[in-house]
Image (cartoon, helix red, strand yellow):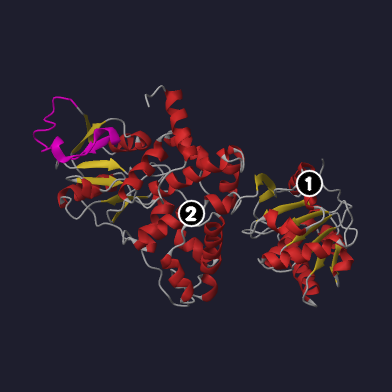
Amino acid sequence: MTALDLSSPVAVVGTGTMGQGIAQVALVAGHPVRLYDAVQGRAAEAADAIGARLDRLVEKGRLSGAERDAARARLTPAGQLADLAGCGLVVEAVVERLDVKQELFRALEDVVGDDCLLATNTSSLSVTAIAGGLASPGRFVGLHFFNPAPLLPLVEVVSGFATDVSSATRAYETARAWGKTPVACADTPGFIVNRIARPFYAEALAVYEDQGADPATIDAVLRESGGFRMGAFELTDLIGQDVNESVTHSVWQAFFQDVRFTPSLAQRRLVESGRLGRKSGQGWYDYREGAERPEPHTAEPAERPAYVVAEGGLGPAAEVLALIREAGIEVREYGEDNGYGEDNGYDESNGYDEDNGTRLVLPSGGQLVLADGQTSVEYRDVVYFDLAFDYRAATRVALAAARSTSPRTVAEATGLFQALGKKVSVIGDVPGMIVARTVARLVDLAVEAVAQGVATEEDVDTAMRLGVNYPLGPLEWSRRLGGGWACSVLDNLHECAPSGRYAHSLALHRHAYAADQQEGTPS
């Protein structure tokens, strides 16, 4: 099945921001486009707005004057639904209410031909449910564009329970012909991006609610250590707190109130207060004129340690050892005849389980351990450091310590990372810290989605990179960290907080076991 022919008209119903964006995409691709809105006059206003955007494309050199004029000639406001007869594709972008969408498509079936493809741009409703009352649900698909549609490349092509393969294929090929990057997915709550991305927001909110760190610090760590384009608090302010919470609530309800998707009470209070983010002038941050942006917590300069003792290669943080050596700090290996366990006061009775991972021992005898889902309070004199996307490129590293942790150990850990050219944020003793717990949960949901046939590994990774600008797709991240890494972190988190929120999926268990078998690791 090939893409929709360029001579075939495309109709867009609903002329808000998304509707206008989708119409512009189809128009620039070469289709005749008809705009319809239930409110009289809005279609004509939308056509004028699209025309103005085409003018700006000409000014920027992205479109020629002749191409703009031809596109404008192909754009037609429709006065009534009957004017959409003869269209080869109708894309709906109206209010996110199931009853409204169902009524619209039932009316469209009486207008368009039998070969017309019907599509919804819903981001949170069931494609299957919207098509449930149609006489021919096989021609119904989801075409979920991301805002702004003309700029963002990703389109989720969603097959409902009754969608014909030929319809999904035609929608997929049409999106690709429009210059987009389509990914195919089954009709699951949140589809790919809005399902798998929930932990990015949820874990940041959980750290905040547990008094682990303030929003500015959490955002800085996600950006400067995790490699994410934006932090969770600034991103939800951009999306709109009401919109983000609504999607979270919709996914939670659709999964029968699965605890892994539970909405945040802190975000609920923010919405109730009317602080919706940029659009209202206040959210987690204050966007009013003259308001100052809060700075992330950054530790004061501390003295670098003379040496560290390395036990193991630090696993996913192996680059840290190279950086320490490059900074001129001596790295002693465990077992060398160098006074380890004597002069530095190291005490193996502190309770840290060596099987949990490799570590650095500081001159104080305290230990520096990569975040593994446990807390410092469980051990004597252990400081955790957070996961980084790229330790060499990272400009900030987070440390976590219990109140009982020796101030000298915290100072030595701080000085060590400062000597590597990193800013240091010391946060509360929260299990899994910030980046590690977020990535572990993203990996879990991604592996589960693939195992349940929602999408392929490649499409999941593509969707998360293009849809929300993650530095890596979750499956790519899992391969980099090791197949069992996320499973181990979540096991430890679940032990610390046994609510079920961190209970990993059966799919992740199988994923970790398969990785162990490939690596020859006993299970």
- Residue that mark 1 sits on: 167
Q: Is residue 50 above or below residue 495?
A: below
Residue 491: x, y in percent? Answer: 36, 42
Residue 276: x, y in percent? Answer: 51, 72
Residue at image coords 86%, 60%: 70
Residue at image coords 69%, 63%: 18
Q: Are marks 1 and 2 in contact (CB under 8 Å)?
A: no
Q: Which of label 1 and label 2 is nearer to you?
A: 2
The foreground one among 275 and 38 is: 38
Q: Quadrant of the C terminus?
A: top left
Residue 415: x, y in percent? Answer: 23, 48
Residue projecting furthest to the left: 342
Answer left or right for 351 relative to 46: left
Q: Crowding near pointer 1: few (<14 within 10 Å), some, many (20+)?
A: many
The numbered mark at residue 258 is 2
The prevailing secondary structure element of the residues shown in magenta is loop
Q: Which residues are magenta?
A: 335-363
